[in-house]
Image (cartoon, coloured by chain):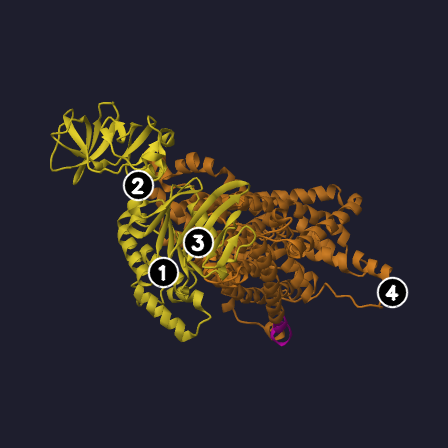
Chain colours: A yellow, B orange
Amino acid sequence: MSVLSLNRVGLAYQNKTILQDISLSIDEAEIACLLGPSGCGKTTLLRAIAGFKSLASGEIKSGQQVLSDEKKTTPTEKRNIGMVFQDFALFPHLSIGQNICFGIRQQTHAQQQQRLDELLELVGLQGYAKRYPHELSGGQQQRVALARAMAPKPRLLLLDEPFSSMDVELRGTLAKEIRTILKHESISTIMVTHDQHEAFSMADRIGVLNQGRLLQWDDAHSLYHYPQTAFVARFVGRSNFIEGRVCEQGVSTAMGVLPCESLTDFEQGQVVKVLIRPEYVQLSVSSEIRAVLISRQFRGGYYLYELELSSAERVQVLLSSLAKHQLGESVGIVLSTDRLSLFASDDTQGI
Amino acid sequence: MSALFGIRAWWVTTIGVVMALPVLVVLGFVLQPFNENWQHLLDNLLIDYLTNSLLLMLGVSVGVLSMGIITAWLTSTCDFPGRRLLSWSLLLPLSIPAYIIAYTYTGVLDFSGPVQTQLRTWFGWGYGDYWFPEVRSLPGAIAMLSLVLYPYVYMMTRAAFLEQSVAVLEASRTLGNTPLQGFYRVALPLARPAIITGMSLALMETLADYGTVQYFGVTTFTTGIFRTWYGLDDSVTAAQLAALLLSFVALLIVLERYSRRKARFHNTSQKEQRGQRYRLTGWRAFWATLACSLPVIFGFLVPALQLLYWTLTTASETLTKDFAVLATNSVLLAASAAVIAVVLALLLSYAKRLLHTPLVNGSVTVASMGYAVPGTVIAVGVMLPLAWFDNTLDQWLRDHFNVSSGLLLSGTLFALLFAYTVRFLSVSIQAVDAGLSKIKPSMDDAGRSLGLSPFGVLRKIHLPLMKGTVLTALLLVFVDVLKELPATLILRPFNFNTLAVRAYEMASDERLADAGAPSLMIVLVGIIPVILLSRAIAKSRTGESGE
């Protein structure tokens, strides 16, 4: 039974479509992430799930219970869905303890105290109950916001850009901490971010949104290696596209005839684009496929080289920095994978 | 360079001391022996002053809080017909001085006024057949003061509600609270410092009021000071009463400062865009529109129309050359006071910016305390030292040169302008400070590095950038002086009249209709800063335009 399922959800604001045809579902204790560029509608979708926005079409269900459809929107306070806001939205007039107990005030004092102690220990803030939000650092405030949202044991937790106000160095550690906490509590979570690294480090499943549509709903590995659209390929990770022509053995390109996925979707002789991730390319002295090194950037363990193929197409590749190649050198290359993604030629235009 | 700074610091301290002089003088009189009039006061009057002042403050608190908070909440978080118009109209009653609204309602509600006349025609009642509430009473005074002072609470509270991050309210909903519970548990507690600030400002005005309570026959500290000063001709006891009144004011200042300080911690960052307003429909929308219209109707429209009616019916007698003299007096006086206050404010704010010494900051704080001190108290505090100076000088000249200097300062416009400056310097300092804080200190440094003196920075960089601010400051002081009544009554030179004084005299002579023209003039001028204020508020709320 899924904790939350969206069925063909559409949302409009002042006759402008913001989201359309979004379907997905979250399982018990799963951490999902909505990833997309700013303005793609990911925050709007999160707010629709929270009940702050009404749907134009489709439905949002929790188990068998309909939370939103085009006719009705269950008020936020009746949904039992917790949320951690981008700026944490702690109540500045209440102490940390009062903030955390805000959502469980109907419980007895003893129950509240017990839950408070439990949560403070979980987020590592024992002894902070009497402090006020302005006395805490950003990371501490975030953990308080998380504890407050978890206190009523919501069926689902929403995190809106949880690390956007953090230092870059802090983000990695916090993401790890929060994932541990969420997994410890087995709490289903949806988080929103525009940063793929946050998505990779937090989520079990990632949905990529663009222009109000859900392009792919997959785990991080599939998203990276088998993107279903050129947008996803470009948005997630570094990507090169080289031109090719579909033939019987695969796709004929400047890097030779390549074996590809989903060849049957294309006609023989059709011009297509092949996705080459930088780390797919390796050097091989014996290879007949030659390329010239054009430029080089040092990246610590790797160099990011730009290669020019015989077709004059350029490809960025990552190569170990143990060996240093001269610019202008001609090298032999091979591909280290045999499952490449193909896209219709026009699909990659304009991105 | 440091010599230049040294002179400045010295000036600032001097200004601070001079501005504090009236209050110090009044406080100093507490050390004087209490004379036999105190027995009389203690036996009969003081308990009245005390209870009436306290009841007045209590009543006005209830009035301004209920009107101010409800309208602020409705206009800042809900949407209903007329909201945009009402959200700035609700500031309009601020343009009517309390004593003027008191005159108009007396005219509207007394036996021969339109309301009672209409009731008699409808029901065929005669004199004495029916009971009608007496507006000239303590409850009446509470109603009048509440109607014109609630905008302080409205303004501060509305700003607080609008500044609250929507996320905070949404967070309360994700934790199981309805919008109304969110209001009680989050929005209202967060706005509490702002509400208390607004209320303490309204209460300072209440304590300072003389015109309303005097006209309604409610004896308070201010009327007591007048009575002792003029009726008993006892300046010492009057000053001692003024000192007592000041102790109430001091409590309010402490309350206000405390809540302003607390407000810093109640900031919620506003990264989220403003959420949608609750759209009210049907009866709810009707009640919301009504709740926000009533204060505007009774606090502004009714009195303004009554004044207009009086002005038109008495135009041929009141709008004469005499009236032109009156208006010119008022305008010149207010303009002079405004210029003095703004020049001093520029000097003080600029010095505070350049020299962060505790002495300078302290002096500026002292110089801007006047807003809380009732005009009556300042008048007493100005009159006593000036009269002493005049008498001493006169005596000395007579003794040594056998000539008389007469009253050099005390009976002149100098005394009046001095009192106005003490009372309203804070208004201009506040406006100038706000403008100055928008000019980054790095601009000062850039100017200095390009060879400007501190004065050069003021003249070439700040003044051009602050033209608007300076004009606003001038206007605010101008209007406040135009409305001022008690200090003007005490300190004006013999036979020198202003619009406010004329309105007061006509009303005291039971010639309410003749008070209409000068009152209307004051109200009309008073509307200008209210419009400026509402525009400034609208501009600072960029979130509003996105709805």
Where is residue B181? Give x, y as percent.
52, 63
Frontmost of labels 1 and 3 is 3
Q: Residues within 10 Å of mark 1 (few under 14, many from 20)?
A: many
Q: Residues within 10 Å of mark 3 (few under 14, many from 20)?
A: many
Q: Secondary structure at mark 2?
A: loop
Name the residue located 41 percent from the left edge and 62 percent from the top edge. A154
What secondary structure prevails in the magenta region? helix
Amino acid of disc 1? Ile
Where is residue A329? Give x, y as percent.
14, 25
Q: Which residue is mark 4?
A: B126
Name the residue located 72 percent from the left edge and 52 percent from the top edge. B302
> Do marks 4 and 2 both belong to one polypeptide chain?
no
Amino acid of disc 2? Tyr
Q: Which residue is mark 1?
A: A187
In the current view of this chain or complex, which residue is farthest to the front?
A248
Quarter where residue B510 is shown? bottom right
Q: CA distance from mark 2 to mark 3?
A: 24 Å
Instruction: Describe residue B409's horizontal placement relative to residue A21 as left or right.
Output: right
Q: CA distance from mark 1 to mark 4?
A: 78 Å
Q: Earlier in the sequence, mark 2 or mark 3?
A: 3
Which mark, by number, is residue B63? none
Which mark, by number, is residue A5? 3
> Do marks 1 and 4 both belong to one polypeptide chain?
no
Q: Which residue is mark 2?
A: A226
Q: Earlier in the sequence, mark 1 or mark 2?
A: 1
